[in-house]
Image: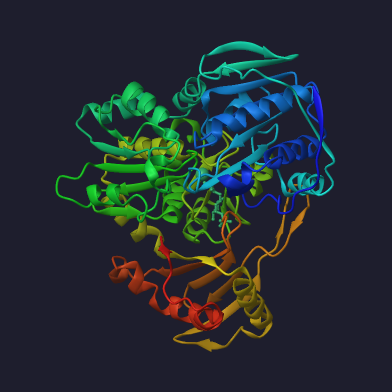
Amino acid sequence: MQIVRTNPIDGQKPGTSGLRKKTAVFQRPRYLENYVQSTFDGIGGVEGKVLVVGGDGRYFNDKAIQIILSMAAANGAAKCIVGQRGILSTPAASHLIRNRKADGGLILSASHNPGGPEEDFGLKYNGPNGGPASETVTDKIFACTQKIEVFKICASGGVDINTVGTQTLQNMIVEIVDPVSDYAALMEDIFDFDKIRALFASGFTMRFDAMHAVTGPYAHAILEGKLGAAKGTVVNGTPSPDFGGGHPDPNPIWAKSLMDTMFAKNAPDFGAASDGDGDRNMIVGRDTYVTPSDSLAVVTAMAHLAPAYKEGLAGVARSMPTSRAVDRVAESLGIECYETPTGWKFFGNLLDAGKVTLCGEESAGTGSNHVREKDGLWAVLLWLNILAETKQSVADLMVDFWAKYGRCYYSRHDYEAVESDKANAMMDALRAKLPTLAGTKVGNLTVETADEFAYDDPVDGSRSTGQGIRISFEGGARAVLRLSGTGTQGATIRIYLEQLETDAGRLQMAPADALADVRSSAMTLSDLTAMTGRVDPDVVT
Ligand code: VG1
Ligand code: CO
């Protein structure tokens, strides 16, 4: 074992979901080592502990795993459970931590960010409940990065991570496991696989786009293997270190070929996609894109059709920028709906305390109490289970849903790689205006309430401030503005737009038309163009 002297490296502050940087930054001397040691120190050491290690298979995944294993062994960990070939989807890692009663896990992923030597890499720590470390823990990790003096590492000839079985590294056991089997068994417990099998056997067709990312092996095994979907249902199903050169981000922009297929003649009945690390999902019917906010609301209304949720839901939670569609469903079900800051780490306490069963985010994350991460394939299977029970098309299901609950038109506009100073100045100026906004008319809308969101965790009492600016207008419109915490270049400004519509004659509008007024008011209030020089967003979802 070697004790290597080091110095703190600036900027190792975990964001919305762990530390994300350009791959080349992670490859700098001592960068990864400093962060791993700080993680170990921040959680009180790993001596005698069992850790799960795996990632989304992106470039540098394999080398980083070897370094992490050598450092875990040098720090006295008892055991590391590693996905074969270094692969574990984020939800599968969460399940493995829980199922094997591990003390935590390290997940190597920058999620939907592109991968490769010029692109992004990331690392995050999940705790013994299988969920992302809370802010209290990430703050401790960050504090350790600022005062680190040494890290511990041992010589290793390279662990064979390609073969399932048990090895030792110094005094640590390394167990290489099949990344899919435990997860697939969990899905079989939750859903009615017989019903879904019968749906496929009846001629129901589907396309699942794994986007060259981690869900390929899971989707092949579950959809085509266990559920009998036709071979070829899963496309782009082999994980590649650079995700085939694309953004593994399941939205209409980056999953355009899936959208084209679903809106073409002879489209399959159902389309879905997942992201780099397998925790996001995109749901598309024939000629029908389902927004993630609507998807959360629909599955909340219909989850009881799947065996694991047949007794009903304890409650639901959504991140603050997620549309309020699910609130309307929760109200009609008579269950609590919690509003949390962006990022899955805020759902953990609510799930652990049994206050909620389902949760979701507008960014294509949906999940339940089966793990402590959002779960892309789980969401797809829940939709399949619902479709198998209702025998409805996605389009008809949405029509019925909106007729019952009204429609929350929704869109997110992202302005990427904005100079950080300008983005911060814009947010500061808007923040300063908030106290006087209520009652003022902006464009065609009148502001009802305006504030900066802060969250008081109802379980542990912790408070998280500065979680995004929200402006509600009379008539059911809302604009939310916040800066992304996952970008690796400059700042990304996110503007989330929402408009509730309950008039039966106005439920089939183009979202951009339904949102024109609130977009215009948000642009006026934020003064985005004057403050940043930007006019049109880079990405609209
Ligand atoms: C984004 C999303 C957020 C999500 C996070 C991690 O964060 O908005 O909803 O939880 O990514 O998702 P931000 O701070 O950039 O808005 V993943 O699939 O990247 O783990
Ligand atoms: Co992800």
Quarter of the figure with the N terminus: top right
Compared to residue 220, the image places residue 487 above or below, namely: below
* Residue 435 shows in this picture: yes
Compared to residue 239, the image places residue 253 above or below, namely: below
* Residue 286 shows in this picture: no
Quarter of the figure with the C terminus: bottom left
State the image quarter where residue 303 is shown: top left
What number of labels is visible?
0
Compared to residue 362, the image places residue 500 above or below, namely: below
Residue sitting nearer the eye, 509 or 431: 431
Residue sitting nearer the eye, 295 or 126: 126
Answer left or right for 4 relative to 428. right
Residue 314, horizontal then vertical, whole percent? 59, 42
State the image quarter where residue 55 is shown: top right
Residue 475, horizontal then vertical, whole percent? 47, 77
Answer left or right for 81 relative to 35. left
- Color style of the picture: rainbow
Residue 498, horizontal then vertical, whole percent? 46, 68
Residue 440, horizontal then vertical, whole percent? 57, 88
Residue beneath the point at 78% across and 28% down? 46
State the image quarter where residue 30 is shown: top right
Residue beneath the point at 50% across and 37% down? 59
Compared to residue 391, the image places residue 250 above or below, namely: below
Residue beneath the point at 45% across and 34% down? 214
